Image: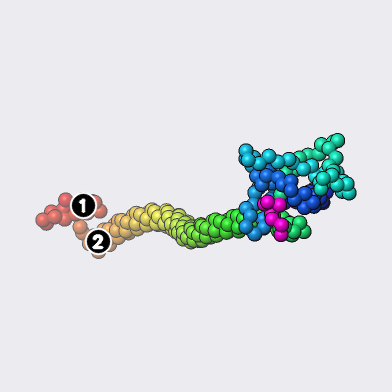
Amino acid sequence: MKTVSDEEWMSYLAKSKAKKLQPDNPTHPDDLLILGGTEGSKRKRRGDRARPSQSHSTSVIQTEDVQMGEFVDGGVTVQTAVPPPAVVGVGSSVWGSSFDPAASSVVCPSGQRNSGSEFEDEVDHLKKAHQEELAEVRGAHACEIAGLRKKHAAEKTSLRTKAAIRETEVTNLDVLHNNLIVSLTQAGKDVWELVEDVDELEETNVAFKQSMADKYVDGFWSSIEQVKVLFPELDPDMLAQVDVMKRIKDGKHI
């Protein structure tokens, strides 16, 4: 916030005091700088210069290096050797006879403080609005992120459950596969054993049949010998026709 320096403020006070000593030489109100508004007067912005009217011709009083003491025709001598920066004077026609210069030391800073306070209030309002907007955006994003995290966690849990089920199914299939392989292997062994048993049975059967044939032949010839002993009168040629390979059919020995 811009403030009035002490030197500048003292120059304003000296100018006001000089104008009090010269009431018959007023300056035009449009050329005056109003530092603080008094009752019934309008406030002008510093740096604005009003257009002088044709009915009033005024002179600007130089406020820097004013020397008080010598009076000329009721006026104040003014040193103009080195022209200082021109400052618009304040006439009694604007402030009136009731103007108190000391009051401006309160009015001017107060106006500036009010302006600064309004600016600070606006800045605070903008900050507050920005913070509220930022908090709202953060809240929205936080809710969205929380929802996405919850959804992700649910999907992750579901996928893990499905993966566990699939893993169990794969394990069961592996066990079944291994059991089937073992069963097939055992069945193959059993088949080979059965084949060997069948071969053995066939060999045994053949041997049994051969044994029965051998016994039949031995019994047949034993019977012939017994007949020869029991019946010696039988014709040997007739007995020679008897053979183990022949049989009797329809009463004939064939």
Part of the protein shown in magenta: 92-98
State the residue lying farthest toward the bottom.
230
Name the quadrant containing residue 64: top right
Q: Is residue 45 left or right of residue 190?
A: right
Q: Secondary structure at mark 2?
A: helix
The residue closer to the viewer here, 26 or 40, is 26
Can residue 71 be seen from the camera position used here? yes
Identity, as a three-letter code, of the amino acid under mark 1: Lys
**Residue 12 x/y as whole percent:** 78, 49
Query: Which residue is found at the position 71% from the left and 57% from the top?
Result: 97
Q: Which residue is mark 1?
A: 246
**Residue 45 x/y as whole percent:** 66, 47
**Residue 103 x/y as whole percent:** 74, 59
The residue closer to the viewer here, 252 or 26, is 26
State the residue lying farthest toward the front.
73
User: Pointer 2: residues within 10 angstroms few (<14), some, or many (20+)?
Assistant: few
Q: Which residue is mark 2?
A: 227
